[in-house]
Image (spheres, helix red, strand yellow):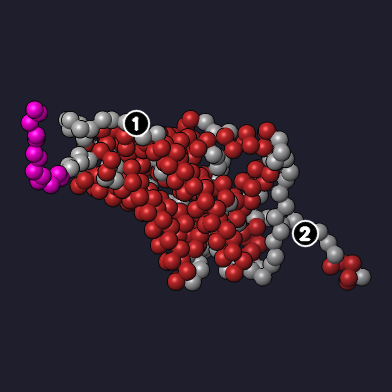
């Protein structure tokens, strides 16, 4: 019965000693129910991949946030559905405004501030405030320029409010809509492109316009050089927020398409800034300029009354 004698239980001592005597042996660790499994180190990750995860977030965190959003979503015809877009506290709004004023190189604005809870509260009120600030500052600037002229009579230009509202809200909604559609189209062509939701893009554009609120107030100063310096500073800050946010979403595409996309984003932002300055502040007021009437020399003969 040699085969029966081989099937015997043996009591092993230290695992290290057993492995030293028999290095080819296989060990199985059975842990108790109260013990936590030890973390096994995975394969080393490249620095480029770590940078991508830091900028855009890994897939697990994105899935967790998307599932969290799905749990609290409601049908679009209910009031609760639209209430979630304004479910943001003051601290989050101020934090996002600070992030738009102080862009951090290498950090993604959507990933750092927006993706956990995108909102429409901040973008809506930023655009509304910017509309009234531009209209009021434009009227005050016109008044200060013509102050002291005897022929000038101040008339409030309420049309500037409607014009500013049309320009600002069209830019804050139509441009993100076009960019969102473009990213979806390129995502179908290049599978590795990171896509943003429409709400996230609107949120980025809305908060990037905050810098123009104090800039429009300072545009009251009747000096063109100061105005253009202010618009360049505001354009540099807000444009860098947009460029650093959307560059990770297009850099996996062809280099020509990626550069053209970023250039178009910055170009449209530049047209908005320069257009607002030129129309609301530097536009010549032709109706208020003094007019002179040239009367040709005429010989007037007055007949004496008899």
Q: Is residue 50 left or right of residue 135?
A: right
Q: Is residue 132 magenta?
A: no
Instruction: Give the Cα separation between the discs numbered 2 and 1.
Output: 100 Å
In terms of secondary structure, where does tag 1 sit? loop
Q: Quadrant of the C terminus?
A: top left
Please state the horizontal and vertical placement of residue 95, each as a whole percent of the image.
44, 37
The magenta stretch spans which residues?
294-306
At a point 71% along the width and 49% down the height, the residue shown is: 31
Q: Which residue is mark 2?
A: 10
At a point 41% along the width and 56% down the height, the residue shown is: 268
Quadrant hosting residue 266: bottom left
Of all residues, the one furthest to the right in this rendering is 1
Q: Which residue is mark 1?
A: 156
Q: Is residue 3 above or below residue 104?
A: below
Q: Quadrant of the N terminus?
A: bottom right
Whichever of callouts 2 and 1 sits on the residue coming sooner in the sequence is: 2
Mark nearest the camera among 2 and 1 is 1
- Give 65 or 232, whichever is nearer the viewer: 232
């Amino acid at each position: 019965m040699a085969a029966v004698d081989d099937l015997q239980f043996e009591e092993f001592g230290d695992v290290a000693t057993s492995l030293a005597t028999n290095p080819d042996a296989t060990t199985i660790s059975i842990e108790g129910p109260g013990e936590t499994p030890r973390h096994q180190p995975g394969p080393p990750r490249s620095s480029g991949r770590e940078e991508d995860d830091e900028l855009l977030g890994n897939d697990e965190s994105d899935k967790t946030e998307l599932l969290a959003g799905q749990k609290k979503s409601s049908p679009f015809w209910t009031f609760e559905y639209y209430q979630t877009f304004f479910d943001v506290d003051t601290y989050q709004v101020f934090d996002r405004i600070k992030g738009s004023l102080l862009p951090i190189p290498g950090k993604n604005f959507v990933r750092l501030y927006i993706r956990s809870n995108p909102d429409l509260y901040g973008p809506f009120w930023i655009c509304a405030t910017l509309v009234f600030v531009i209209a009021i500052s434009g009227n005050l600037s016109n008044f200060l320029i013509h102050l002291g002229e005897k022929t000038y009579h101040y008339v409030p230009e309420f049309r500037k409010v409607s014009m500013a509202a049309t320009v600002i809200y069209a830019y804050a909604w139509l441009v993100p809509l076009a960019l969102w559609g473009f990213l979806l189209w390129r995502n179908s062509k290049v599978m590795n492109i990171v896509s943003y939701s429409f709400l996230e893009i609107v949120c980025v554009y809305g908060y990037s316009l905050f810098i123009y609120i104090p800039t429009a107030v300072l545009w009251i100063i009747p000096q063109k050089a100061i105005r253009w310096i202010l618009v360049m500073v505001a354009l540099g800050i807000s444009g860098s927020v947009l460029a650093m946010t959307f560059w990770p979403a297009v850099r996996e595409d062809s280099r020509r398409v990626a550069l053209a996309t970023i250039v178009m984003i910055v170009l449209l932002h530049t047209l908005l800034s320069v257009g607002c300055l030129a129309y609301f502040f530097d536009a010549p007021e032709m109706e208020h300029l003094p007019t002179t009437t040239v009367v040709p020399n005429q010989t007037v003969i007055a007949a004496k009354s008899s």
